[in-house]
Image (cartoon, rainbow, N blue to C red):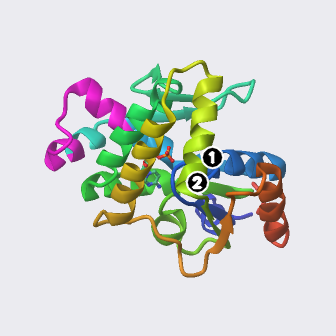
Amino acid sequence: MSTATEQKMNAPVITIDGPSGAGKGTVSHLVASRIGWHLLDSGALYRVVGLAALQRGVAFDDDDALAEMVADLTIKFVATPGGQEQIELDGHDVASKIRTEHCGNLASKVAAVPAVRAALVVAQRDFRKAPGLVADGRDMGTVIFPDAELKIFLTASAAERAQRRYKQLIDKGLDVSLATLLEDIAERDHRDANREVAPLRPAPDAMMLDTTSTSIDDVVAQVLELAAHLRPVDDD
Ligand code: C5P
């Protein structure tokens, strides 16, 4: 019988990185549920940290205060019977609050602080469990799981990503402008790609998949095909 630590080290990982709106979230979710593996939505962690800073009045340019705050947070991903997302910050469900564009922008600000990133490394690696993990983010293949068995980098044009986001938000009944979304995406891309620590880059051994004119179902099928040779590990 293997120990819990060995299972963690052995559990295969698929990393799915890329810029905002490339379809990572949907693809990761569908791939993980099709093969029955765990899912790490690392963006949600940064969004919760951004929300916490806002709620606690911590200045976004005060790196020390942000680092101190992040060390003190209790963030929990809770599995719910209906499969609906539940993410708790200090015991309160914040799953819908963190999905706003505003929170995405706050996330990208706190994510540029090296001490915040460092404080979240262990929590992210803890998601690696039998039978395997699908990890969605910006630095999954480069920093958090450099030994991942399969690395995917999803891209799409900024115009297409803004259009997708627009549709999602309109479908949720939110009043947004496409031009503002495009500006937000460009600003976030720039910050994510140019920060000092873990900038958004494909790992040298990542497979690049452009989703601009490919349906989500086709992208999922491609990832599943690439993942077909990976061997899940047992719990016992
Ligand atoms: O993926 P999502 O849009 O939820 O991520 C929100 C923000 O969190 C990103 O724009 C990025 O700045 C940051 N992030 C990151 N590293 C990750 C995941 C997200 O820097 N692994």
Residue 130 location, x and y as percent?
A: 71, 56
Q: Which mark is residue 47?
A: none
State whether label 2 is within 8 Å of ligand 1.
yes
Closer to the camera: disc 1 or disc 2? 1
Q: Decide: marks 1, 2 in contact (CB < 8 A)?
A: yes
Q: Quadrant of residue 90?
A: top left
> What residue is at 59 percent from the left and 18 percent from the top?
173
Q: Which residue is mark 2?
A: 136
Residue type at tag 2: Asp
Residue placed under numbered mark 1 in the picture: 25
Gap between marks 1 and 2 measured at Cα: 7 Å
Estimate how packed mark 1 is, as few (under 14), some (14 to 19) or many (20 or more) residues with alpha carbons within 10 Å: many
Please state, as top left, top right, bottom left or bottom right, where the C terminus lies in the image. bottom right
Residue at the bottom extreme of this rendering: 204
The boundaries of the magenta stretch are 49-67
Relative height, residue 119 to residue 76 (above, below): below
Q: Position of residue 204 (x, y in %)?
A: 54, 81
Q: Is residue 68 left or right of residue 1?
A: left
Quadrant of the frame with the N terminus: bottom right
Task: Determine the residue positioned at 45% across, 48% down.
Answer: 185
Which is more N-terminal, label 2 or label 1?
Answer: 1
Residue 61 painted magenta = yes
Looking at the rendered structure, the kind of residue marked 1 is: Gly
Asked if residue 166 is among those painted magenta in the image, a careful observer would answer no
